[in-house]
Image (cartoon, grey):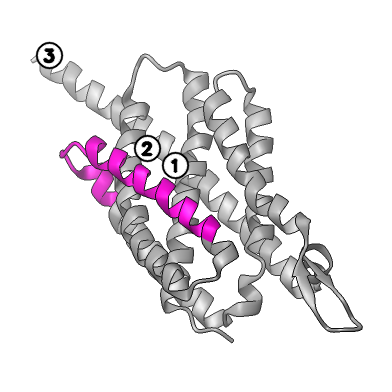
């Protein structure tokens, strides 16, 4: 009887730990989405997008992409890798500052979507992406199937998509863009399930210190945010109605 009570208490305690961990993870993810959304909208609506990201010749009417745009697009990649590799040594406040900077940079990089797509398309695609993301997150959290092998393969596909997207920035191929988006939908939904399972294991790991788990909630929020943004952009390219 005593063992039964102890097991019940342990399960309840574990449930509280998981609930608190994922509450923080999703709080950071939603914070990043809000920051990016506001920054993206403001840069597009204020006209700063033309001042910062384009070199416009008002005599000939020609325009070229500014080097600042490439810095804004590629800087988040290095920042995210740095955060994930060094979170043990970074303070919580430093990690949080880098997380917010990442959100701002992504918002700036995505500001052009307000010039290309209608608001209706952006909103509807956002909710479609949110529904798909939520379904896969629940699947990853609840399934007892080990998704680790699938995750490794999907991350390899993610790297391939990333490289192909960089190449297509210069090629401008609509067929390649379509293929990247279709593959991306499957890759990012699958990675969402895998990441949720991985985060659940980390949250349950008693060997990880409380401070490191606190930092991992930021890293978890960052990772889920990245997956959601990529899923949203893949769906937007497939379903969005351009202005």
Q: Could you tell me which residue is drawn at 41 percent across and 63 percent down?
A: 180
Task: Give the Cα separation between the discs numbered 2 and 3.
Answer: 24 Å
Label 2 vs 3, first from the N-terminus: 3
**In this view, 89 is above or below 153:** above
Q: Tag 1's secondary structure?
A: helix
Q: Residues within 10 Å of mark 2 (few under 14, many from 20)?
A: some
Residue 60 in percent (x, y) is at 87, 84
The residue pinned by badge 3 equals 3
Quadrant location of the C terminus?
A: bottom right
Magenta segment boundaries in residue numbering:
138-167
User: In the rendered image, which quarter is residue 97 located in?
Assistant: top right
Q: How many numbered discs sit on the rendered protein?
A: 3
**In this view, 76 is above or below 239:** above
Q: Let me know if residue 186 is in the magenta part.
A: no
Q: Nearer the viewer, residue 172 or 113?
A: 172
**In this view, 154 is above or below 152:** below
Q: Nearer the viewer, residue 156 or 188?
A: 156
Circle on res. 19: 2
Q: Let me know if residue 159 is in the magenta part.
A: yes
Residue 139 in percent (x, y) is at 24, 50
């Amino acid at each position: 009887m005593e063992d039964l009570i102890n097991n019940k208490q342990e399960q309840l305690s574990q449930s509280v730990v998981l609930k608190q961990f994922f509450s923080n993870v999703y709080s950071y993810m939603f914070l990043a989405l809000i920051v990016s959304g506001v920054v993206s909208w403001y840069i597009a609506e204020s006209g700063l997008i033309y001042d910062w990201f384009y070199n416009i010749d008002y005599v000939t009417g020609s325009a070229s992409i500014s080097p600042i745009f490439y810095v804004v697009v590629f800087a988040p990649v290095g920042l995210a890798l740095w955060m994930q590799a060094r979170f043990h040594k970074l303070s919580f406040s430093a990690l949080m500052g880098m997380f917010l900077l990442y959100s701002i940079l992504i918002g700036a990089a995505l500001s052009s979507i307000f010039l290309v797509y209608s608001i209706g398309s952006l909103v509807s695609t956002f909710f479609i992406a949110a529904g798909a993301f939520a379904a896969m997150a629940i699947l990853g959290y609840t399934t007892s199937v080990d998704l680790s092998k699938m995750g490794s393969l999907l991350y390899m596909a993610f790297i391939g998509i990333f490289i192909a997207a960089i190449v297509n920035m210069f090629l401008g191929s609509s067929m390649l863009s379509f293929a990247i988006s279709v593959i991306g939908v499957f890759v990012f939904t699958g990675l969402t399930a895998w990441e949720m399972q991985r985060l659940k294991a980390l949250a349950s790991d008693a060997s990880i210190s409380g401070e490191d788990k606190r930092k991992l909630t930021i890293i978890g929020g960052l990772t889920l945010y990245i997956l959601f943004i990529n899923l949203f952009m893949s769906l937007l390219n497939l379903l969005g109605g351009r202005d």
